[in-house]
Image (cartoon, helix red, strand yellow):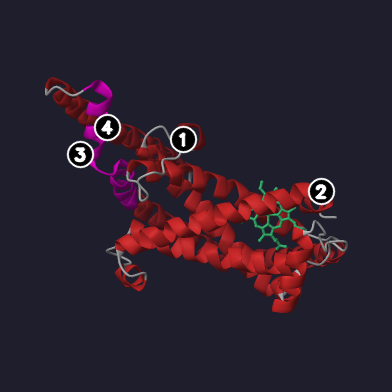
Amino acid sequence: MSINRNISKLGGALRKDKIARELDDEIQTHIDMETDENVEGGMKPDEARQAAHRAFGNVALAQEDSRGAWIYRWANDFAADLKFGVRMLLKNRGFSAVAVISLALGFGLNTTIFTVVNAILLHPLPVRVMHWINAIAIFIMIGSGWKIYNDDVILGWLHFPDGLVIGKWAQYGLQWHFFGMWIFVLNGLAYISYGIATGRFRRKLFPIYPREVLHDLFAALRGHFSHDDISMYNAVQKLLYLGILVTGVVIVLSGLSIWKPVQFHLLTSFFGGYNTARYVHFAAMTAIVAFLVVHVLLAVLVPKTLRAMILGR
Ligand code: HEM
């Protein structure tokens, strides 16, 4: 790629930053002016600012729409770079052949060593990395979700305390929520693909027999965890992990339905409309929080499982 092109790309990135700042300033000025008007109209400053935010609507969505245009440009640049790369490879066939063969040998060798080491470990590295990324993403999603919820509650008596939420304003909560959403979805897709492709789900989560679930559940309630061999999950764990995977899918689909009810109108009507999708989303969040309480408690009660999820054995 020529120096000129690199400079122009850098310029583009800096311009994008400037435009983003200008957009933020414009929105902020708009809200400030509305706040001043509300104060002049007799509202208290806090109340006036909240009313101004409400009147403006969803700041994060407005910013998102503007960014949509930038992403389109970025995709175009990426396609042009890709085309250029392929043309150069076709032009220097000898060099390309050596590069492809070296890469193939490198990947092959690496994968073989990795597979052997992985087989010895209880939780292979990808599972551990994805598990902890997921834990961080869930933390962001729940904290920011509670902030958004507080702005328009479903259950009149339930407001989440300020100390437990993420985001100073509901709009910031929304931005955190979208940020966490990408991590959660991409990481979740990678985890599910890995679990299916390597046969891990089949080996670790199946079969589940109701009789064993009841047996292990009563044993756990009496304080006996059938978890002497930590290379295998007990029946209750299998059911819980499978349940949380399904809940993860439901929370993403219901989230999409309330985020873009027009674009995903089929999905939204599958959930019975916007309002029902909101209830489903909330119920799925509650299930995840309940799972987490039990899950973290068990990890603390049987620390060798925690060690294995960190170190692999
Ligand atoms: C601080 C939070 C967390 C801690 C301390 C923790 C701890 C652990 C531990 C110790 C294991 C291994 C259990 C065993 O070997 O018996 C595990 C597995 C698992 N955890 Fe977590 N976890 C946390 C957060 C989460 C979250 C947020 C989710 C999903 C919502 C989750 C889902 C799972 C799943 C599906 C497995 C099974 C993984 C597999 O074998 O493929 N965990 N966790």
Q: Quadrant of the C terminus?
A: bottom right
Label 4: state its secondary structure.
Answer: helix
Residue, disc 3: 55
Taking the image in four quarters, ligand 1 sits in the one at bottom right
Instruction: Name the residue tied to disc 1.
Output: 161
Residue 189, position as x, y percentages in the image: 57, 64
Which comes sooner in the sequence, label 1 or label 2? 1
Mark 3 secondary-structure assignment: helix
Marks 4 and 3, how far apart in space?
9 Å
Determine the main secondary structure of the stretch shown in magenta. helix
What is the distance, in whole Å, between disc 1 and disc 3 at their CAs? 24 Å
Marking on residue 50: 4
> Front-most of 127 and 23?
127
**Mark 4, other Cα within 10 Å: few <14 / some 14–19 / many ≥20:** some
Sooner in the amino-acid sequence: mark 1 or mark 3? 3
- State which region is magenta: 44-69
Rendered image: mark on residue 303: 2
Q: Residue at x 72, y 72 (%)?
A: 213
